[in-house]
Amino acid sequence: MSKIDTHLLVTYHNTSMSKSDLTRHKIFEGAIECIAKNGFEQSSFTEIAKKTKVNRTLVTYYFGTKKKLIQELVKYAIRSGQIFTQQYLSKNSSSADLIEQYINATFQWYEDYPLHAYFLLLSFQRSYYDKDVQNIVAEMIEMARYRIQEMIKKYYPANPDLTALWADQLHSALLGFLLTNFAYFKKDTQEYKKQCVSLAKKIMKEN
């Protein structure tokens, strides 16, 4: 288990690691891989148990239903990205351009956790017909926009309306470039990262 995975596990459960935590973590990671590769409908508790090498009854014990597991998986994958970004920014806090570092962190997360990224893309799609997932995804999007908006406020003082507009444009660009283009077409990450950074600088300059 990598450093980020261990940190993620402790933070997600808000407690020290226990055997139960480790089992849940294995189920989370195995389920994300199954769903990212096979889709939601084809990923049964039995398939997830095989992937994680745990007894199927444990999957049922911890999550009860597939619906509940999916909801917990979406939260887990979102938290994974949040923690990764926080760690990345803390290591690169000396940079004057925090917005660019935020973009770099997002792309680095995709490269390090491509299954999580693709799972979230599938979750976005599922949110169109699954109200519970829709609520979780909507909350995640709002938090991400708020985070970007706060960074813009701090480093690029502007009036509230423009700041909100910039945050919305940057967040939409990251979702569009990162999840849609990468997940579907496997485009070069460095090229799209440059496009996102260029877009950020263009927005700041034009507004």
Image (cartoon, rainbow, N blue to C red):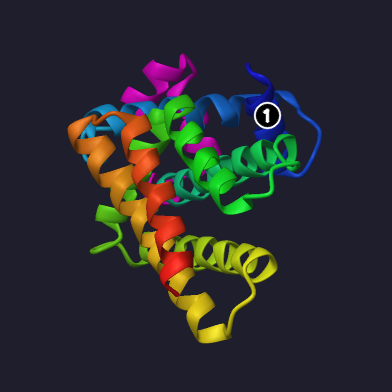
Question: What residue is drawn where x is 57% and y is 84%?
Answer: 160
- Left or right: where 53 falls relative to 13: left
Question: What residue is drawn where x is 48% and y is 66%?
Answer: 204
Q: Label 1 is placed on what type of residue?
A: Ser
Q: Give residue 87's position: percent from left, percent from top.
A: 69, 37
Instruction: Residue 12: name its quadrant.
Output: top right
Tell me if I can see residue 119 in this picture: no
According to the image, label 1 marks what residue? 20
Q: Give residue 128's position: percent from left, percent from top.
A: 24, 64
- Left or right: where 139 falls relative to 128: right
| Residue at the farthest front position | 205
The residue range painted magenta reads: 45-68
Look at the numbered disc 1 and give the secondary structure of its residue: helix
Q: Is residue 96 above or below residue 187?
A: below
**Quadrant of the rendering where the N terminus is positioned:** top right
- Left or right: where 133 falls relative to 90: left
Q: Is residue 34 above or below residue 137?
A: above
Instruction: Residue 5: name its quadrant.
Output: top right
**Quadrant of the rendering where the C terminus is positioned:** bottom left
Number of labelled discs? 1
Q: Give residue 145's position: percent from left, percent from top.
A: 50, 66
Question: What residue is drawn where x is 79% and y is 40%?
Answer: 15
Q: Is residue 97 above or below residue 84?
A: below
- Left or right: where 153 falls relative to 16: left
Residue 58 lies within the magenta run: yes
Tell me if I can see residue 11 in this picture: yes
Question: Residue 11 versus residue 147: which sits nearer the camera?
Answer: 147
Question: What residue is drawn where x is 29% and y is 52%?
Answer: 176
Question: Residue 177 versus residue 129: which sits nearer the camera?
Answer: 177
Question: Residue 2 versus residue 14: which sits nearer the camera?
Answer: 2
